[in-house]
């Protein structure tokens, strides 16, 4: 293990410094080749014909007119790739191209490859499809109606894709103890990732029978598995290379039909094939935030301590499974990791609807319940006459404990996060003294640093790293991780540079290539820094041990007296006594043979043993507290956000400037969800599938963000690091509506809230109606009997895991 | 990405040449200036011209002549960016600058022209979509279909006027000089527009807008206020333009209030002129005029934000525009 480099940052040379990303120059100069920048000789272009119906049976498809188009080289239909797949083993319900049924407007029905993109589009419209339209399900309520058409043959029940009913402890008894009980309903609208780069894939099939797919994907390993299944080809003949992603945010974590289609077309035509989705098609590929209706009943003691919590979520899933089963669990998982919840009951349903499938978006399934919880706390604080700070700050989870639902909290810097935002925002001086129309809102949150379990059950590592040292002094690092802009390539380089003491310029990082790099599960669940970081430390430490052994011999000291920095290995106590890295590397190669090492990381086992215990556990959790200061124009309902303070416990900030970037980006995305973003449908079709009409904030809507880093060193993270990629989004929507309440006296129990809804709220208040804008109730559901799980404290067997 | 269909591009060097090229190709041809409306719509196949007559090289369309005192004429090809910087306009016609600088983004203002802006297509969320999207709703009356999905009983298309500069021009009393195969004609800006989402203007097929003629700015002040979701990119959901002339004693000598974005045509609120002219401004009068704006706005569910909200904003914006020009607190 790394002796000197754990715990303190004093002896660190790379970690903790504000360094440029390793790919920064390539990105800003346009050198980076994204998937759509790839051009291969004789390449064809693919375009899809898509369903105009939300729900229909395909009666017949006639391709004869399209085939006679002079520029067409191949046409693919669903029947050519009939094997079903899906990201989760339990939801293998997708077809690369619809075979005999379409389940949302925009689903692919045929794919045409032609010599130009325009010709492919033109020819796709020459395909004649006869549909038999079916009744469509466009809302959760319709989906729960058993009298309506069933979208899939498989489901927990009719159109209920997944139902979860769990109880930890004795919730009823917990309510008995409460001095005050609140029941509220909330709605969080669905929205999409809006990565600037639209998905693109290029496939090349070599004459020797090997297929290469370049794709803007966050999960090349899962794409590799799905391709092998659908193409019915050994994985060893398929190479998947994830090109640099121009943003992903969860939108590129599923295997997609266009990836399968270009692969098959490349095999059929013998020519490389490219498919770049249009922006509109990205709205159909979707996998974005689930719209979630929520009901929360929480009991409080008079000091604000939660005595019991009962949470229900209703997810509008869209037409396919995707990550939906996990999403459903996630809407009930992380309620417990911020404030103590002694008894907890969660019931959730995900309903199939005839819309593009929802899936994981930054925060995956947790921003919606977090919103509900933080708004409800704000209300409870008011009911109980205590301040919004103390209702949170006084009841935080303790470090090194298990929550009621068996999540292991290692470190929690939320206390300090709250203190920092309260202090920086001047909350105590301002709160209650602001002019009319101006308000402050507070909210907190937590997120995973990597899912504790893989998507398909296996006992192999979640991340692997190989390192090779060259005789010229170069260090090559290989890892399956995928840089989606978050800086994971840089984290690999920083980690290895720190351990080996080489300069960043001497490190080459090779990532996300299933032929060349060891498996990393992918860029999702904020797992990469923690898992690849630990794997890289593992691999680099093994090499360092070899180097130090050789250096110690020559310097006539013990290996543990050595340190390495700036391409030198030297004696800590007498830094003039040292050797060049190259020199030591060559000697080590002479002594040990080719210098290479492997490292891997597997998360610690999770504590829960109940069904569903796989979703929620993580090596450690990040924490955030956010304060927002805004004004509301009483005549127009328009809001101006003056400032946002966000304090973030990311463990050690491996590169603070990158963490700040993640925080600002998350705040921006959270504001979009709070203020305006809506994936909504009308007449069965996405209402506004364009960058102009799907409203998302611009630079001009972006207020100043004051990021405050709280570096609570976590023993499980690489150099103590946790995560920063997703968590900072979570407190933003609830902080917004809590601030709106402070400014207007109107409760907004939903997001987004645009000026039209603000004005509606103001008018309701003026007219003496309930000053609230939000959903009225939740539909009735026949819940299954609860799976009752004893609390960890009553279950000594599981303690201390 | 969405590709442009194939087309022929013609590049006339003079207005006369442009007029004859346009005449030669008849309904197959379309004019293009900055192309910021034309090209995206060709990609979505809302426009399907076989021939484009490009005005970019017609030098005369780029000229700005005159002074604020005598009046200024602006070539139809002047870009929106240039409008916001041109000294003659900046000093005399703040409404034009305020209107131009809130159009979309800097990049788009560098390409987009005033002529293209005044003739920009009406908008509707059922229509501003790709071909495949429109196919999924079986198209609509504005193109290839027969029903208006905004109001299925409506005999006409209700698409929304979305030019920011049209109300400004109406509030200034601007006149427009068109050149066509039959010669020239000059009309009031207000007469260019029709309350019909499909036939939204009165320009004849062969005509080219050559110049926008602004009357003298002596004694006038003007302003433009725009409602939109975001401070960039977005088309107007409501645009209020006011031109105002006050006398030495502070009385209103003349005023024109025009609103856009809440109907198929921008409209002058003529009663407002009648009510305000010759009077000292007062809270009551301003409120009276503001409430007229509420009645004149016909917001429907075919743009962003809830229609009733947009309708309610009309009086707020008129009140604020008037108060701003009169130097009153908002
Ligand atoms: C993302 C986006 C946002 C936008 N936002 C706004 C906005 O906020 N406000 C707004 O007002 N507009 C907006 N627009 C529309 C448009 O960009 C502007 O109105 C612009 O000024 C149009 O000018 P242009 O020169 O590019 O027109 P073009 O696209 O070249 O032409 C537009 C129309 O005018 C006709 N035309 C052009 N010149 C002449 C002429 N001299 N005589 C006769 N007909 C002519 C063309 O045939 C065509 O029908 C937006 C467009 C986009 C794509
Ligand atoms: S207003 Fe009606 S006819 Fe006009 S574009 Fe919209 S839907 Fe079509």
Image (tube, coloured by chain):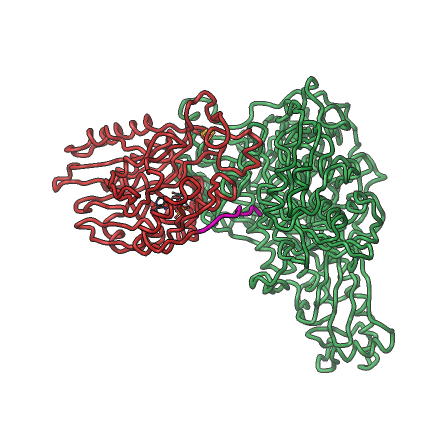
Residue at left offset 60%, top offset 33% = A372
Give above or below for A139 relative to B327.
above
Which residue is at the far left?
Answer: B248
Give the side of residue A163 with respect to residue B81, left or right: right
Q: Give whichever of A5, A290 is nearer the camera.
A: A290
Q: Residue at x 24, y 36 (%)?
A: B256
Residue occupying image coordinates x 17% and y 33%: B277
Question: Which percent across, then down, holds residue A478?
Answer: 76, 62
Q: Is residue A744 above or below residue A576?
A: above
Spot occupied by residue A715 in the image (x, y as percentages of width and height): 74, 55
Q: Is residue B187 visible?
A: yes
Quadrant of the rendered structure where residue A597 is?
A: bottom right
Chain displayed in red: B
Tell me, yes or no, whether the highlighted magenta stretch contains residue B268: no
Question: Where residue A205 sits in the image (x, y, percent)?
Answer: 76, 54
Any idea which chain is the green one in this picture?
A
Identity of the residue furthest to the front in this view? B24
- Residue A714 is situated, as x and y percent measured from the top left of the image, at 71, 54
In the picture, the quarter occupied by the N terminus of chain A is bottom right
Q: Is residue A185 left or right of residue A243?
A: left
Magenta stretch in the rendered image:
B1-9
Tell me the quarter of the image containing the C terminus of chain A. top right
Q: Main secondary structure of the magenta part?
A: loop
The verdict on residue B7 being magenta is yes
Q: Is B17 or A786 nearer to us in this picture?
A: B17
């Amino acid at each position: 293990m790394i002796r000197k480099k754990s715990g303190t940052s004093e002896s660190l040379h790379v970690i903790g410094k504000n360094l440029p990303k390793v790919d920064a120059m390539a990105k800003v100069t346009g050198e980076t080749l994204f998937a759509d920048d790839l051009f291969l000789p004789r390449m064809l272009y693919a375009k899809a014909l898509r369903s105009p119906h939300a729900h229909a049976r395909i009666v017949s498809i006639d391709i004869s007119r399209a085939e006679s188009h002079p520029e067409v080289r191949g046409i693919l239909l669903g029947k050519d790739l009939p094997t079903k797949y899906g990201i989760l083993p339990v939801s293998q319900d997708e077809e690369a191209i619809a075979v005999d049924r379409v389940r949302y407007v925009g689903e692919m029905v045929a794919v045409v490859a032609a010599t130009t993109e325009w010709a492919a589009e033109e020819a796709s419209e020459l395909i004649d499809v006869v549909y038999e339209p079916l009744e469509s399900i466009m809302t959760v309520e319709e989906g729960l109606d058993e009298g309506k058409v069933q979208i899939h043959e498989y489901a927990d029940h009719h159109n209920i894709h997944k139902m979860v009913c769990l109880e930890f402890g004795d919730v009823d008894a917990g309510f008995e103890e409460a001095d005050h009980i609140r029941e509220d309903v909330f709605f969080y609208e669905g929205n999409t990732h809006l990565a600037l780069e639209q998905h693109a894939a290029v496939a090349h099939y070599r004459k020797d029978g090997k297929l290469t797919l370049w794709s803007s994907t966050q999960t090349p390993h899962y794409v590799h598995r799905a391709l092998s299944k659908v193409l019915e080809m050994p994985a060893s003949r398929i190479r998947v290379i994830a090109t640099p992603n121009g943003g992903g945010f969860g939108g590129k974590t599923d295997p997609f039909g266009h990836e399968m289609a270009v692969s098959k077309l490349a095999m059929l035509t013998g020519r490389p094939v490219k498919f770049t989705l249009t922006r509109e098609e990205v709205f159909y590929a979707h996998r974005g935030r689930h719209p979630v209706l929520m009901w929360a009943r929480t009991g409080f003691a008079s000091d604000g301590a939660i005595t019991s919590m009962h949470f229900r979520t209703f997810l509008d899933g869209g037409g396919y499974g995707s990550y939906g089963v996990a999403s459903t669990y996630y809407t009930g998982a992380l309620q417990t990791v911020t404030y103590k919840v002694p008894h907890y009951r969660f019931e959730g349903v995900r309903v199939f609807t005839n819309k593009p499938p929802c899936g994981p978006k930054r925060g995956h399934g947790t921003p919606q319940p977090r919103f509900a919880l933080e708004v409800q706390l704000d209300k409870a604080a008011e009911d109980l006459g205590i301040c919004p700070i103390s209702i949170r700050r006084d009841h935080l989870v303790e470090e090194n404990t298990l929550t009621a639902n068996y999540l292991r909290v290692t470190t929690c810097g939320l206390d300090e996060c709250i203190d920092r935002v309260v202090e920086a925002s001047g909350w105590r001086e301002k709160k209650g003294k602001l002019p009319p129309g101006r308000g402050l809102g507070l909210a907190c949150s937590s997120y995973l640093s990597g899912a504790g379990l893989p998507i398909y059950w296996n006992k192999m590592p979640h991340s692997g790293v190989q390192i090779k040292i060259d005789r010229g002094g170069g260090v090559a690092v290989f890892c399956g991780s995928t840089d989606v802009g978050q800086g994971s390539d840089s984290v690999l380089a920083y980690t290895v540079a720190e351990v080996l003491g080489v300069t960043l310029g001497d490190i080459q990082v090779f990532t996300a290539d299933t032929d060349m790099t060891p498996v990393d599960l992918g860029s999702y669940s904020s797992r990469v820094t923690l898992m690849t970081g630990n794997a890289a430390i593992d691999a680099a430490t093994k090499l360092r041990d070899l180097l130090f052994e050789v250096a110690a011999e020559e310097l006539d000291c013990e290996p543990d007296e050595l340190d390495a920095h700036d391409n030198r290995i030297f004696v800590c106590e007498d830094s003039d006594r040292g050797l060049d890295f190259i020199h030591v590397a060559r000697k080590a190669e002479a002594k040990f043979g080719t210098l290479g090492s492997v490292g891997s990381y597997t998360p610690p086992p999770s504590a829960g043993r109940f069904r569903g215990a796989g979703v929620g556990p993580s090596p450690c959790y990040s924490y955030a507290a956010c304060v927002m200061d805004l004004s509301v124009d009483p005549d127009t309902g328009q809001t101006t956000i003056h400032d946002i303070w966000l304090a973030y416990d990311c463990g050690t900030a491996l590169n603070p400037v990158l963490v700040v970037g993640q925080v600002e980006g998350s705040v921006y995305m959270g504001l979009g969800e709070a203020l305006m973003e809506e994936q909504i449908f009308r007449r069965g079709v996405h209402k506004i599938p364009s960058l102009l009409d799907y409203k998302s904030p611009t630079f001009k809507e972006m207020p100043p963000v004051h990021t405050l880093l709280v570096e609570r060193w976590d023993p499980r993270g690489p150099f103590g690091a946790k995560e920063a990629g997703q968590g900072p989004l979570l407190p933003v929507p609830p902080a917004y509506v809590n601030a709106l309440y402070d400014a207007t006296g109107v409760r907004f129990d939903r997001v987004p809230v645009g000026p039209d809804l603000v004005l509606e709220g103001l008018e309701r208040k003026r007219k003496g109606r309930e000053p609230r804008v939000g959903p009225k109730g939740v539909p009735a559901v026949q819940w299954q009997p609860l799976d009752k799980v004893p609390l960890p404290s009553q279950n000594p067997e599981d303690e201390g895991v | 990405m969405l590709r442009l269909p194939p087309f022929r591009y013609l590049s006339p060097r003079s207005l006369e040449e442009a007029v004859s090229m346009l005449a030669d190709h008849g309904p197959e041809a379309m004019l293009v200036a900055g192309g910021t409306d034309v090209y995206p719509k060709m990609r979505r196949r809302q426009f399907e011209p076989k021939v484009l007559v490009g005005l970019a090289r017609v030098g005369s369309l780029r000229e700005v002549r005159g002074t604020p005192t005598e009046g200024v004429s602006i070539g139809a090809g002047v870009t929106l960016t240039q409008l916001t910087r041109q000294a003659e306009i900046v000093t005399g016609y703040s409404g034009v600058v305020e209107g131009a600088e809130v159009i979309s983004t800097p990049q788009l203002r560098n390409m987009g022209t005033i002529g293209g802006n005044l003739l920009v297509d009406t908008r509707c969320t059922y229509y501003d979509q790709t071909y495949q999207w429109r196919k999924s709703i079986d198209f609509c009356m504005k193109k290839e279909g027969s029903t208006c999905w905004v109001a299925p009983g409506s005999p006409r298309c209700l698409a929304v006027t979305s030019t920011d500069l049209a109300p400004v021009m109406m509030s200034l009393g601007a006149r427009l000089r068109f050149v066509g195969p039959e010669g020239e004609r000059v009309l009031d800006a207000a007469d260019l527009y029709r309350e019909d989402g499909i036939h939204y203007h009165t320009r004849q097929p062969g005509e080219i807008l050559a110049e926008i003629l602004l009357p003298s700015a002596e004694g006038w002040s003007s302003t433009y206020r725009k409602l939109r979701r975001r401070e960039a990119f977005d088309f107007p959901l409501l645009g209020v333009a006011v031109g105002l002339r006050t006398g030495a004693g502070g009385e209103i000598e003349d005023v024109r209030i025009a609103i856009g974005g809440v109907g198929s045509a921008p409209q002058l609120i003529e009663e407002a002129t009648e009510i305000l002219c010759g009077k000292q401004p007062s809270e009551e009068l301003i409120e009276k005029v503001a409430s007229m704006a509420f009645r004149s706005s016909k917001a429907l569910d075919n743009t962003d934000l809830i229609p009733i909200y947009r309708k309610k904003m009309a009086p707020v914006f008129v009140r604020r525009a008037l108060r701003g020009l009169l130097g009153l607190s908002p």
